[in-house]
Image (cartoon, rainbow, N blue to C red):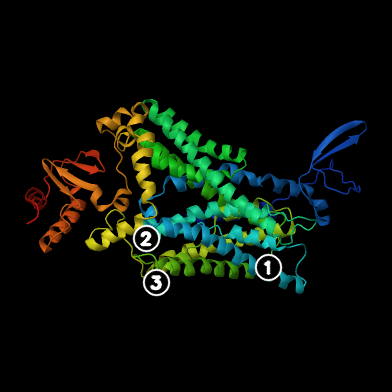
Amino acid sequence: MVNICRCCMANIVFLFPGVLMGVILRYGIHVPSDVNNVTLSCQVQTSPATLLVNVSGKYYEYTLKGEIGPHELNNVQDNEMLRKVTFDPEVFFNILLPPIIFYAGYSLKRRHFFRNLGSILAYAFLGTAISCFMIGSIMYGCVALMKVTGQLGGDFYFTDCLLFGAIVSATDPVTVLAIFHELQVDVELYALLFGESVLNDAVAIVLSSSIVAYQPAGDNSHTFDVTAMFKSIGIFLGIFSGSFAMGAATGVVTALVTKFTKLREFPLLETGLFFLMSWSTFLLAEACGFTGVVAVLFCGITQAHYTYNNLSTESQHRTKQLFELLNFLAENFIFSYMGLTLFTFQNHNFNPTFIVGAFLAIFLGRSANIYPLSCLLNLGRRNKIGTNLQHMMMFAGLRGAMAFALAIRDTATYARQMMFSTTLLIVFFTVWVFGGGTTAMLSCLHIRVGVDSDQEHLGVPESERRSTKAESAWLFRLWYNFDHNYLKPLLTHSGPPLTTTLPTCCGPVARCLTSPQAYENQEQLKDDDSDLILNDGDISLTYGDSTVNADSVTSGGTSRRIVGNSSEDALDRELAFGDHELVIRGTRLVLPMDDSEPPSSLVDSARHGPA
């Protein structure tokens, strides 16, 4: 219970130091005026970023810091003090967000992620787009109401409403997921929510960039134009695919470096290179015009899938702990800064009508994302997404660091200032109320807890397990076959030697690219996804001189079916007994275990065969 409370209150607690510091700086400290400050008035048509001033023949350069209202002319020193505690918004994107996003990809549980890959992609891509347009449409109606009632003090276009929809569509259920992890909540719910939040952030970033890039032809840049719309869609697809390719390429290069060099003998250097290569993905993507945060996400997934298996044991532990620490520090620093910004940001624009409309819009937008898509997905899923899981996913749509970082990135206009102030309140409310009420909601919805993700398939009927295996694999089967036979042998020390999978004409190249460990059956990868993706006939179990094949005894009469079922169940149990070899599509993985004997029923059935 202590761990649950700690996870629940972590982000909430870090908000209060920022709020307290913001109150002190805003209302408790007054800087005396400087007699050297002189305020002069001159008529200038524009606001230049740099100003050269001639004072008695000497030229001085001044840099624009921001607009000051007439009522703030006597508080220049106080404004300067508040600016010192205000970070450049790019700090969040260049320094704080990369480790958060990278750790999300690096710690991804691929086994359950790929089992629900189709559903996760639907929620992340289609669901985020639905949520964005739903929120944007509702807020446009709200803005029209504000204009009629005279509450609107500046320009607020439909593109601004869509941008706000993209910003607040970025979910960040870090508090909820921490509680899920401690309570060992239903693995399907955890996988769906975690997978959606990881990809949802990437989609929200690229979607907001595409909306900003919307530029119709003509003088009015806020009218609807079909050509500009399709151009924005092309920008979205181009940026996302380019960022994906950049992140995956960096991960592949790191995997090759760690495989074909002796960095394993220098764990500290190995860890440092891994860190720098991962971080450089962000800078490289930004330099090429892509989105660095999205590239870092897919770099983390690629590093976890390939590079991690080439690292020494010490470096594996170090990289996990390093990025976990960086993620924790960055996440909680952002939450502390949120509390500080609530009082130190000088251009807040809180409008009650806009705020109420925003809360209503995010609720309806999340509903339009979860419930209709869940109904459509259940048509093709054998393992249905229950209504209680849908309600929990709806409840867990918190907004956090990503929404805040997107909102604070541009606060130059009246509309952007109102959007930022409202986003800040939405983050506060969802983290405090929804994050704090997660445990009670789990109990109210009767969602399973205490589920071991590694053992949750045991006890499931054999026929259902087999159909679930085939069902979960169809979207990923082709990729897995290519990955297992070619990419893993190329990028890691695991998988079948390339000499057995590549054509004979490629023999010299295959021998050059296959590491000696692959031939010696050393450092083989135990793939967490294999039990979900392999066909039933792809696995056989060897113990001494006895061999059990998953499909060798699955046809025939009743007695044959019984033996087949027992072999399937024994295959799951047998991985915990004795020295044996797991044969996967011709790849012999030697798994050293303890000296305990296997169940006698398995050995007897393997030796004598079916009755």
Q: Label 1: few (<14), some or many (≥20) within 10 Å?
A: many
Q: Rounded to the nearest whole Å, what is the CA distance between mark 2 and mark 1?
A: 36 Å
Report if the CB atoms under discs 2 and 3 are less than 8 Å apart.
Answer: no
Q: Are marks 2 and 1 in contact (CB under 8 Å)?
A: no
As drawn, the label of residue 444 is 3
Task: Name the amino acid, label 1.
Answer: Tyr
Residue 74, given in percent of the width and then of the height, sits at 82, 51
Front tag of 1 and 3: 1
Total marks placed: 3
State the residue position of label 2. Answer: 188
| SS of the residue under disc 1 | helix
Query: Of the residues shown, which amino acid type is indicated by label 2?
Result: Glu
Mark closest to the chain's N terminus, 2 or 1: 1
Q: CA distance from mark 1 to mark 3?
A: 35 Å
| Residue at 82% across, 44% down | 48
What residue is disc 1 on?
140
- Tag 3: residue type? Cys
> CA gap, disc 2 to disc 3?
18 Å
Give whichever of 469, 437 is nearer the camera: 469
- The foreground one among 463 and 481 is 481
Is residue 405 shown to the viewer in this render? no
Which residue is drawn at the image coordinates 17% and 52% (left, top)?
A: 552
Judge from the rendering whether residue 574 lies leftward or rightward of residue 531; answer left or right.
Answer: left
71 left or right of 603 in image = right
